[in-house]
Image: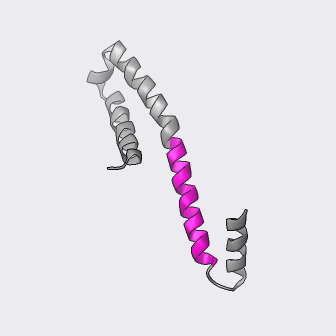
Amino acid sequence: MSKIEEIKKEYKEVTEKLSNPDQISDPALFGDLSKRRNDLEEIVKKINSYEAAKKELADNRELAEGEDELAMLAKDEIDN
């Protein structure tokens, strides 16, 4: 499992724990879980943005292989 997958998995697990009444009945544990979730949330947002940009670049590269107007637009997107 990659580090990115581990982070996403931990974020999901912490979020699930925060929705469990048994977990949130302990104020100290609730505080720790909330802090960890907030820390992970920032990282997960950046990961999701990165993955979306990576996919968009791959899609544009595929489109850019042609010679039509759409390919030219895709090439412009890649260059910018």
Q: Is residue 36 above or below residue 71?
A: above
Q: Residue at x 69, y 78 (%)?
A: 70
Q: Position of residue 12 (x, y in %)?
A: 36, 39
Q: Residue at x 58, y 63 (%)?
A: 56
**Residue 62 shown left or right of residue 37 in the figure:** right
Q: Position of residue 72 (x, y in %)?
A: 72, 78
Q: Is residue 34 above or below residue 80?
A: above
Q: Residue at x 35, y 30 (%)?
A: 19
In front here: 2 or 32? 2
Q: Residue at x 50, y 47 (%)?
A: 47
**Residue 77 shown left or right of residue 9 in the figure:** right
Residue 9 location, quadrant: top left
Residue 34 location, quadrant: top left
In front here: 26 or 61? 61
**Residue 22 shown left or right of residue 27 in the figure:** left
Q: Position of residue 50 (x, y in %)?
A: 55, 51
Quarter of the rendering occupied by the C terminus: bottom right
In front here: 50 or 14? 50
Magenta residues, start to end: 45-64
